[in-house]
Image (cartoon, rainbow, N blue to C red):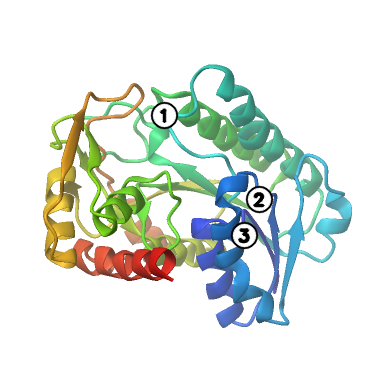
């Protein structure tokens, strides 16, 4: 099929493009290379993709591009593009989250509403849940505690409206803390491993007892492929990892993988960060056949190999 991936030069988007190309699809990738200080990393993400004759990269803002031209012949859309990050979404920064997470999504959906699409898969987040107690299923009321979570929930609502009113074949995937090679430099595992490599201290927010359902990137990509091929629409799925872990457990694994002792700079908890996330993925298991395979040690080893390659070359 001919597939569009927004955010194609990003962390999950670039891995997804590789998987789609490996399965024989023609892929159009869109990215606006928003952060100049990260552009070299994004260029690295798409370096091999650009060698594939079945991949085309469009550099531009979805709020400005000619979407009719961009969507010509497209059968499936993976909407990965967004500005992410809980801590940076407060204050004046929220304007950018509104533009790139809400207005962009609405413009893309409006352009798609009359197209004969087979699937529109939207990348959502566990941040839409807010404070949770125990395992979280998709029917838990969404009560985000960060502007970022609010912006992504707005995207979900827009997707649902276009599904109900125009029959858009839509699915939302709520990612739980995805990690792995090409992870953004502002994300914890990337920062931790980079600091260890450079023998620098890491900033630990809180006491390290906070837990996350860490999801390896290849499992997140698999969830997208499964959603693309799923015949039902208008649904939402939690996409979590093989096992939930605390931040302290992550640090122990990092020390085991790297063979280095971590230096910790303790910092207070940040607003908008939930203490715990715990994905109930039984719905995705039953409906999609989703079964995360990569454990934390294997995943961190893979990301460590990537970090060494990126910063020692």
60 or 149, which lies in front?
A: 60
Q: Residue under circle 2?
A: 33
Q: Residue under circle 1?
A: 87
In the picture, measured across the screen, residue 47 lies left or right of residue 270, that is: right
Picture coordinates of residue 306, whole percent (x, y): 38, 68
Q: Residue at x 42, y 55 (%)?
A: 183
Q: Residue at x 49, y 30 (%)?
A: 148
Q: Which mark is residue 18?
A: none
Which dot, 1 or 3, sits closer to the camera?
Answer: 1
Q: Residues within 10 Å of mark 3 (few under 14, many from 20)?
A: many
Cα–Cα span, label 3 and label 2: 10 Å
Q: Residue at x 21, y 61 (%)?
A: 296
Picture coordinates of residue 63, whole percent (x, y): 77, 39
Picture coordinates of residue 49, whole percent (x, y): 62, 74
Marks 2 and 1, the one that precedes in the sequence? 2
In the picture, measured across the screen, residue 182 lies left or right of residue 240, that is: right
187 or 28, which lies in front?
A: 187
Marks 3 and 2, the one that precedes in the sequence? 3
Locate the N terminus by quadrant.
bottom right
The answer to the question of whether label 2 and label 1 lie on touching residues, with beta carbons closer than 8 A, is no
């Amino acid at each position: 099929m001919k597939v569009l991936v927004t955010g194609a030069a990003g962390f999950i988007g670039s891995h997804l493009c590789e998987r789609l190309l490996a399965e024989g699809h023609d892929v159009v990738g869109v990215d606006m290379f928003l952060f100049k200080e990260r552009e070299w990393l994004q260029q690295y993400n798409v370096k091999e993709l650009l060698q594939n004759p079945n991949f085309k990269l469009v550099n531009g803002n979805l709020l400005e591009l000619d979407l009719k031209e961009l969507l010509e012949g497209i059968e499936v859309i993976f909407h990965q593009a967004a500005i992410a990050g809980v801590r940076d979404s407060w204050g004046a920064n929220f304007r950018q989250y509104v533009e790139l997470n809400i207005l962009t999504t609405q413009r893309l959906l409006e352009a798609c509403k009359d197209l004969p699409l087979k699937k529109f898969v939207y990348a959502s987040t566990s941040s839409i849940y807010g404070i949770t107690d125990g395992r979280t299923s998709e029917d838990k009321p969404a009560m985000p505690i960060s502007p970022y979570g609010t912006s992504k929930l707005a995207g979900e609502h827009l997707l649902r409206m276009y599904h109900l009113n125009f029959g858009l074949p839509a699915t939302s995937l709520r990612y739980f803390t995805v990690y792995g090679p090409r992870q953004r430099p502002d994300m914890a595992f990337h920062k931790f491993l980079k600091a260890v490599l450079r023998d620098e201290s890491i900033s630990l927010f809180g006491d390290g007892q906070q837990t996350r359902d860490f999801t390896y990137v290849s499992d997140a990509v698999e969830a997208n492929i499964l959603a693309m091929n799923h015949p039902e629409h208008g649904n939402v799925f939690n996409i979590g990892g093989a096992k939930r872990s605390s931040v302290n457990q992550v640090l122990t694994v990092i020390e085991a993988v790297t063979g280095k002792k971590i230096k910790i700079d303790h910092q207070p908890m940040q607003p908008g960060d939930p203490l715990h996330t715990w994905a109930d993925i039984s719905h995705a298991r039953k409906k999609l056949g989703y079964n995360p395979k990569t454990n934390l040690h294997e995943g961190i080893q893979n990301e460590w190999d990537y970090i060494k390659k990126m910063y020692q070359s």
